Amino acid sequence: MSSNMTTTSSPIFSQSSALPGQERYVAPIDETPLQDVDSIDDSAPATSLWQDAWRTLRTNPLFIVSALLIIFIIFVALFPGVFTKQNPNYCNLDNSLNPSSHGHPFGFDMQGCDVFTRTVYGTRTSLSVGILATVLVVLLGSIIGALAGFFGGWIDAVLSRLTDIFLALPILLGAIVVLQMFRTSSSIWKIVLVMTLFGWVSTARIARGAVMEAKNLEFNTASTALGSTPMRNLINHIIPNSMAPIIVIGTTSLGSYIVLEATLSFLGVGLPSTTVSWGGDIANAQTILRTNPSVLFYPSAALAITVLAFIMMGDAVKDALDPKSRTA
């Protein structure tokens, strides 16, 4: 009888100092196969950060919608002749402020230019400025931030103080001042270079922090122990592992540079009047806003949709590359 009692109560272990009711229950080992709990599926293929990000993105409705919008906008910028056969610079005063008609769905502006044609062709200019500015800002900011974060010491001190100086300058005010000094030059590259001059600061700060974090990880120590030089570690290992936050800020900032180009053109210090752009058309339409708001509405709507698409894309990429930032 006593042996049976012992067998049935074997999972319960009483400590000599335990009071009644404080016994601890331990399940039999055959009921908790730890080897199955802690096992790793070796048959599963190895995945990287980018593969995990793509797996997340392709199931994210926000990414799908923004990607479709961006693909359509890029197609319009590359092939505007598919949507309209009109010349965006052809204007006839006889058509001034005429309403929409067959072949002219958006009507005409004060100069008699086809609003739909100018909106379509303005996509190329605004998108080109935004993409070129973003690429140069990411390159310059990444280089400065990577050098400051990796080498540290006096290099970090000098580059950080340089970053603080440019951070204190508002990008819009600085762009207006510089563009006023070089009004004789009329080129898209002038706008792009001015945006790059004042826009690299945020990217540099993020790149510096990402590189400082990556250089203290085990793979950098192992590479150094195997005889790799510091510059080789920086180029081959640290920078590729620090690109996630840089890509996020680049994707998010692209829409801001499109808005900045439109703002500068609206203020009259951006692209010349002969260049078709959304900002220039918005500036020309402000004088007839009360009588013909549709002339202002269409380029403004195109600008808003484009910026919204890139912001949505940036949010989706941020959620995929930085899971800790997800709100849901």
Image (tube, grey):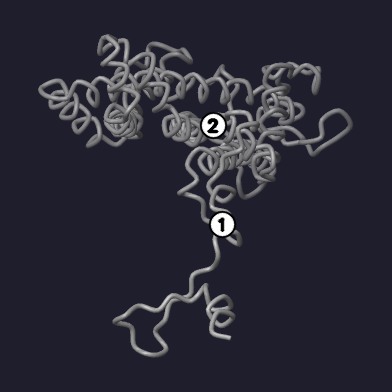
Q: Is residue 270 left or right of residue 113?
A: left
Left or right for 59, reference 275: right
How many marks on residues? 2
Question: Residue at horizontal 66%, vertical 44%?
Answer: 60
Whole-percent x, y for residue 31 in the image: 61, 62
- Quarter of the image containing the N terminus? bottom right
Disc 2 target residue? 279
Residue 287 seen in the current view: no
Q: 6 or 268: which is nearer to us?
A: 6
Pointers 2 and 1 in contact (CB under 8 A)? no
Residue 319 percent location from the top left of the image: 53, 44
Q: Is residue 209 visible?
A: yes
Which is more toward the observer, 33 or 213?
33
Quadrant of the rendered image containing residue 245: top left
**Residue 121 location, x and y as percent?**
67, 22
Relative to residue 212, is residue 3 depicted above or below?
below
* 139 on left or right of 89: left
Which disc number belongs to residue 328? 1
Horizontal and vertical percent position of residue 227:
27, 9
Disc 2/disc 1 C-alpha distance (Å): 36 Å
Q: Residue at x 28, y 11 (%)?
A: 231
Q: Residue at x 41, y 15 (%)?
A: 190
Q: Residue at x 46, y 34 (%)?
A: 253
Q: Is residue 232 above or below residue 112?
A: above
Residue type at tag 2: Gly
SS at mark 1? Answer: loop
Q: In the rendering, which numbered label is found on residue 281?
A: none
Amino acid type at mark 1: Ala
